[in-house]
Image (spheres, rainbow, N blue to C red):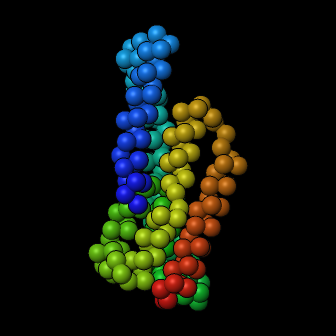
Amino acid sequence: MSWISTVSLWILPLLLLTVLIHAAVKKIPAYDSFVEGGKDGFQLAISLIPYLVGMMVAISVFRASGAMELLLGSIKPFLIFIGVPADIVPLAFIRPISGAGALGMMSDLLAEHGPDSFIGRLASTMQGSTDTTLYVLTVYFGAAGIKYMGDALKVGFLADAAGVAASIIIVTIVFGS
């Protein structure tokens, strides 16, 4: 295992050295190219701001309107029936929308129930098994200028649902409820 640690420490500096050697051989001004790339990255970040603001407003409206509590109240009997703790459901809903929001919810769950509890283990597994689908689509599709994201959104939500279901099943099998 120590050779893996050594390789992982040296791989990035070696990659950068390879790029610099390649640029020197091809007589490409590497630093000037780096600065031009940085300018493009900054302009890309500025162009993404409207998409991010739109996503943040939608998240705030969803949470502040009480839609989250309404949704949870309507599915709570089903959750009790299948043995899923209701405390974990807001994390499952917020995770595809906001990574920071999901991390805050997971931290609250860990503080309340403990990291070695069923809910703590389930929250940790769910956090690692799902992705911030709306954030990813907003940023990457916005950067590429793609306006229609219907199928990607469906597939992303389906993958998140599969991650949530797999988390519940696997944590229940491994750690019990």
* Residue placed most toward the observer, 20 or 42: 20
Residue most toward the left? Answer: 111
From the viewer's perspective, is residue 14 above or below residue 68?
A: above
Where residue 76 appears, x then y in whole percent? 53, 82
Q: Nearer the viewer, residue 166 or 148?
A: 166
Q: Position of residue 73 (x, y in %)?
A: 51, 78
Q: Is residue 46 visible?
A: no
112 on left or right of 166: left
Task: Please report the residue visible at 67 percent of the width from the left and 55 percent of the height from the top.
Answer: 155
- Dividing the picture into quadrants, the one containing residue 165 is bottom right
Q: Residue furthest front?
A: 3
Q: Is residue 111 visible from the viewing direction of this image? A: yes
Query: Can you give x and y, in whole percent of width and height, for residue 175 in the image?
Result: 47, 86
Q: Residue furthest right?
A: 151
Please state if 13 lies on the left or on the right of 122 as rendered.
left
Who's the residue at 41% across and 60% down the image? 1
131 over 126 or under it: above or below: above
Q: Residue at x 53, y 43 (%)?
A: 138
Rendered view: 58 above or below 166: above
User: Residue at the spot x=42%, y=41% of the render?
Assistant: 11
